[in-house]
Amino acid sequence: MKKLFLILLFVPFFTWAQNKDAAGFAITGNIKGLPEKSSVYMVDANNPSDTIARSTVKAGIFHLMGHIAEPNLFELSVGNPKQKTMLFIGNDKVKIEGAAGDIKNLKITGSPSNQDFIEFQKIFNPYFAKLNSLGQLANSPAGAAKRDSISKAYAAVVATIQMELEQFIQFKKSSYVSPFVLVVVSQLSDDVLLLEKRYKMLDPEVQKGFYGKYLKEQIDNGKIGAIGTDAIDFTQMDTTGNPVTLSSFKGKYVLVDFWASWCKPCRMENPNVVAAYDKFKNKNFTILGVSLDRAREPWTRAIRDDNLSWSQVSDLKFWNNEVALKYKIQQIPQNLLIDPNGKIVGRNLRGADLEAKLCELLGCN
C-alpha cells in the first residue's frame, strides 16, 4: 500500500457518476503571471515520485494529458516546485484559471470529484482548524488550568465532525472522495465498527478503489482485539505442558493478560491483577495469562514470585508468541476482557480501571 498523503488541515483549500472516458484526462490551464516555458507537472499525492503528466507554459497556457485508473488526489506544481495546489480528479476535462500569485485560490472546473473535494474542505477545514487551535491551547501554559473545558470543547467539535461525516457519506456514496474523507476523519476515532458501518455505505465500486482498499485494510486490522468483536480462539501449553484453549473458558468473564517475566511494567501491574482476581474469582471471572517469555525457568519463577494463581500459557517464542501475533500485540502489558459469549468487552484495563469495569459487569457487593 502506498504511503497516504493525509493531513487534517487542507489550507488552502466528487458528484455522482465518475467519467471513465478511456481517452483519459485533459487539463487546460490559464494562469496569469506564469513565466514563459516554465514547467507544470502533476504527481500522485500518495506517491510524489510518480509524475502523472508534465507540460510547459506557452503564453500563460499549459495542457496536461494522461490516463488514471480512478479518481484520486493529485498535487499540481505550476511555475516552480513551491507553487502547488491539490486536486482530486478522474479522467475528466478540467479547466484551471487564476493568477500565479494566488495559487491557493485557483478556479478548477470540469471534475465532479474535485467539486466533492472542494465541498469536503469547505465543510471540514473550519472544524479541523478549531481542533488544531484547541490542541495548541491545551499544550500551552495558559491552557493548563482549563484542561477540562478544553477537553469538552474538543469532544464537541469531534462530535460535530462525526455528524457532518455521516451526512457527507450518505449523500455521496458513489464518490471516490467519500472513502478519502473516511480515512481522514478516522484519525479522530478508534471505533472500528462504526468505520466499518460507514465503509459499507459506499458503493461497491468505490470500496474497490485506492482509498476503499486502504479503509478495508484498516478495518480488518482494527477489528482484531477490538471491543465489540469476537475474540480469536487459540490454544497454547501451560507450565506443565498441557494445552489450554481460550474457548474452554466460555461461559465466564475471562481476562486474557499479555505479560512476561522480563517486562518491568508487567511485574508492577501484577499486584493489581492479583487483587482483581481475588476479588472477583467467585463471580464467574477468571484470568488466562499469555507470557511472551523465551525461557521456562524465569517464566515459572515470576509466576511463583508474583502469586499468579490462574492459568498461564506460553510457547516461549518471545515477541513471536503465536497468540500475540494473532492479536497483533506490539507492547506489553496488554489485556482483553472477554464476556461469557466470547465478545471482547474491554481492553487494556489496568489498576482501578480493571476493578471498575469488573464492578460494572459483575457487581461489587
Image (cartoon, rainbow, N blue to C red):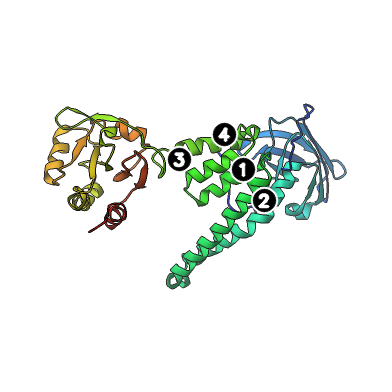
Q: In the image, what residue occupies the spot 52% across and 41% down?
A: 196
Q: Which residue is mark 4?
A: 213
Q: CA distance from mark 1 to mark 2?
A: 10 Å
Q: Which residue is mark 3?
A: 222
Q: Is residue 274 above or below residue 53?
A: below
Q: Which residue is mark 2?
A: 120
Q: In the image, what residue occupies the spot 74% across and 30% down?
A: 67
**Which residue type carries mark 4?**
Lys
Q: Are the residues tagged 1 and 2 within 8 Å (C-beta)?
A: yes
Task: Give the mark, 3 or 4, whose residue is nearer the N terminus.
Answer: 4
Count how many numbered circles sit on residues in the image: 4
Q: CA distance from mark 3 to mark 4?
A: 14 Å
**Which residue type carries mark 1?**
Phe
**Which residue type carries mark 2?**
Phe
Instruction: Determine the secondary structure under disc 1.
Output: helix
Question: Quick one: quadrant of the C terminus?
Answer: bottom left
Can you give x and y, in whole percent of width and height, for residue 117 in the image? 69, 47
Q: Are the residues tagged 4 and 2 within 8 Å (C-beta)?
A: no
Instruction: Determine the secondary structure under disc 4.
Output: helix
Q: CA distance from mark 1 to mark 3?
A: 18 Å
Q: Residues within 10 Å of mark 4 (few under 14, many from 20)?
A: some
Q: CA distance from mark 4 to mark 1?
A: 11 Å
Task: Tell me if 292 is positioned left or right of 220 in this view.
Answer: left
Q: Quadrant of residue 172?
A: top right
